[in-house]
Image (cartoon, grey):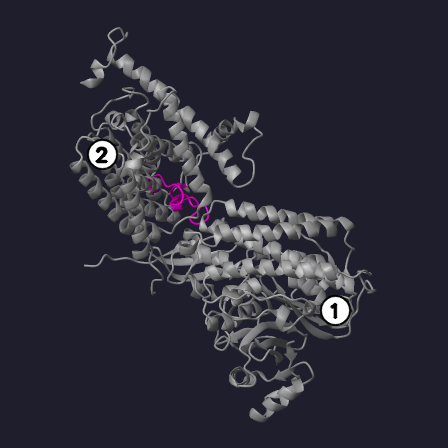
Amino acid sequence: MTLLLSGEKTGTKLEEKFPGSIVESNRDSFLVKSEFLLPVATYIKNTPGLEFNYLASITAVDYDDYFEVVYHLTSLRHNHSLVMKTRFYDRDNPHLPSVVGLWRGADFQEREIYDLMGISFDGHPNMTRLFLWDSFEGHPLRRDYL
Amino acid sequence: MNHISAIPADWPGGFWAHFGTFAGILLVFIIVMIIVLIYLERRVIGRFQSRLGPNRTGPFGLLQGIADAIKILLKEGITPAKGDKLVYWLAPIIAFVPAFMVFAVIPFQDGALLADLNVGILYIAAISSVSVIGVFMAGWSSNNKYSLLGAMRAIAMVVSYEIPLGLAILSVVLLSGSLSMNTIVTSQNIPFILFQPLGFLIFFLAASAEINRAPFDLLEAESELVAGYHIEYSGSKFVMFYMVEYFESLAMSCIVATLFLSGWRGPGLPPVLWFLIKVFAVFFVLMWVRSTVPRLRIDQIMGFAWKFLLPAALINLLITGLQVVLWPEGIPWQMIFANFAIMGVLILLWSRLFKVGVGRVEV
Amino acid sequence: MAIRTEPFVINMGPQHPSTHGVFRMRLTLDGEVVVNLEPVFGYLHRGIEKLTEGRTYAQIIPITDRLDYASPMSNNLAYVLAVEKLAEIPVPERAEYLRVIMVELQRIANHLLAVGSLLNDCGAYFTPFMYMWRERESIVDLFDMVCGQRLTYNYMRIGGVSHDVPERFLWALDKFIGRMAFFIDEYDELLAENEILLIRTKGVGILSKELAINSSASGPVLRASGVKWDIRKADPYSIYGRFQFDVPTGTTGDCYDRYRVRIEEMRQSLRIIKQALQQLPPGEVKSEVPPLLRPAPGEAYGHIESPKGELGFYLVSDGSIAPYRLHIRAPALINLTALRDMVIGWKVQDAVVVLGSIDICLGEVDR
């Protein structure tokens, strides 16, 4: 049975390693500040005991004040999973660091989020729209699109 | 001039009437055979695929071919705007005519050929290689990358397979002692397929590759280049390309029946009937192979021709030459077993030693 | 003196008999060798994720049918599981068994389609395709008996399934299992040692283990590369913990391994169906759920092992009758991440074979 690691415990562990990175955490997930996203991701990918080498999915949700990007990670070796979240509060030009260097599976998913939500990912080698044509204006999946 | 003296003395009209009548009969025969073969192919392949073939149009679906012909001739012929118009117009003709011309030297009965050339088989080998120019012209003038790719593949393939084809034909010529098609048939007291099993295989495979039939049909592979060199053809020009495939299959079946299966010879039934039975048998094998076997990749096809068929054809020629020198008046039938054994050994050896196809290329 | 050559770009466009839907690849070719590959998506983009934001939870089930239209039962199940996880709704026993039977039948149908299409791409002029389609017809007829539909089943409901199965379904399913075991052996015998299939697929399009894990591949693509990861075993959902079955894996990750993994998975699915049919309990098939379901605010990620890979639904609810956000983790899209690395260095014909062996369905890729 895949064990969903407790957000609180992981949050406390990460807070010790990267002070100031965790904003809040609860039973299911923990919330990380976007500046610390890459270091935290590298840490949980490479540390023995955590070893989250499989990125199951990246999702973006548009809450009206902020954008929230949710990472579902799995460790194939230890068979446990983790939910990592990060937020971006500025609606005009949201951008986050890209995790393509760590997990290549993020390639198309980040392009999809850019296409439909408008969040661009810094460091992505090909940050272009995925489904819609290049001259499309707007980002359809946002709550204020229609 | 053999053909003039072959006209019976009481034939009215002279040489040209004789020629015209028989050319007309031959043309009608070929066209009827093509329609029958197209119908047969669709029904037989349908049965191979555990389904019925077309059986609605007319009794047993016999009118399906005519319905298809009417449909396709009524279609609009679209010409690519930027293509080379003259080459585009000429290409089907150049691909089509040589396939017709081959039938002039096929013997239907003893002495019943349209033109009893004494270089019959050489004429066939020469004429059938002209079709590929038509294919190239079609690919080039369509102004389309897909058809160009298809045409390039076609040329590479056809040119490579000409050589084993010619060598296999040479082995038969050695055995029969003459290039004339009629003499080849009359000298087959035992069908040459038994003396030349390896030669038959080589000829069959090389000829399948020449006519772009499975497993070498990557030129018209729907699932890859979407119809290859005749993508941009529609309407009556497309019909000509489509017919070319069937003409060449029929020609190849006739040639195999003549060279290896002793043509019209056989006990009991009239010779023309024996000939037709053999042609249908060879065509059935062609259909069988088409419906069963996946297709090869282009580099595997080229590898097969140069690394497998060519050396095998050379060795076959050498062994045939040896046999003809040792027994000039006729090879004893016991050599049949020796020939089969040699074929088995060669095929085993080659499949161990050579690998067809290149793997991944470092980019 | 070398001849000057330059690479040219060819477009395996949206309309193509072999791209399994409207999928476009821009290949840069140097002669016949593929130097670069750029996939272009979006020809079937229907905005499903936006559509779901205005519909109630029960109204979304028919929409999920249209995602991966080659295996709609799995899509239905994944969505319904996510909703039940979110709202904590119990499911009766008989419904669980029926769900498992339907999903495993769907897996067999999907793999028949996948293997048939792969062989069609290799050039075996529809013959294996027709044989496999014959069996798929039997499965589709079984589904027709149950829910009246042949393609978009809409069979699962939140809290169970929509109808109980008629008597003749169980009888027909029994007959089908007997026939299918024989047919899978027949396909294996005809195809597994076919020389030409071997040289077309063995060693072609290799996906290494590290790249597969890093690219988040899932399903038969991941398992053929040697990773023994099947969500039915690793994170059993529904009642998969009660069945005994193996998880076939490959060794090298080439197209031949992906083909073999699919054939073996069909056999394992038959095993599961047999066990489920023996253990099928009587009872009701749907628990009481209000038509306008209002789950508590929260989120849930429900994932299943669909025939193409890990199909996940991420649901965010704000307490109203419609979800706030529904995201679909499409296995076909994510399996395509490694397509470029698999195809580069091979020829154009291999690109088609590799794409066929990944088994995509555009309804899911583009959503």
Q: Residues within 10 Å of mark 1 (few under 14, many from 20)?
A: many
Total labels drawn: 2
Magenta span dominant secondary structure: loop
Q: Is residue B344 visible?
A: yes
Q: Return the residue at label 2.
A: B331
Residue B253 percent location from the top left of the image: 36, 32
Residue at left offset 55%, top offset 67%: C218
Quarter of the image where the C terminus of chain B is located: bottom left
Spatial CA span between label 2 and label 1: 84 Å
Position of residue B305 in the picture relative to residue C88 (left or right): left
Q: Return the residue at label 1.
A: C84
Q: Residues within 10 Å of mark 2 (few under 14, many from 20)?
A: some
Residue B228 shown in magenta: yes
The magenta stretch is B209-230
Residue C156 shown in magenta: no
Q: Quadrant of residue A138?
A: bottom right
Residue C47 percent location from the top left of the image: 63, 60
Q: Nearer the viewer, mark 2 or mark 1?
A: 2
- Amino acid carrying label 1: it is Glu
Residue C239 percent location from the top left of the image: 71, 68
Quarter of the image where the N terminus of chain B is located: top left
B98 is higher (above) or lower (below) than C302: above
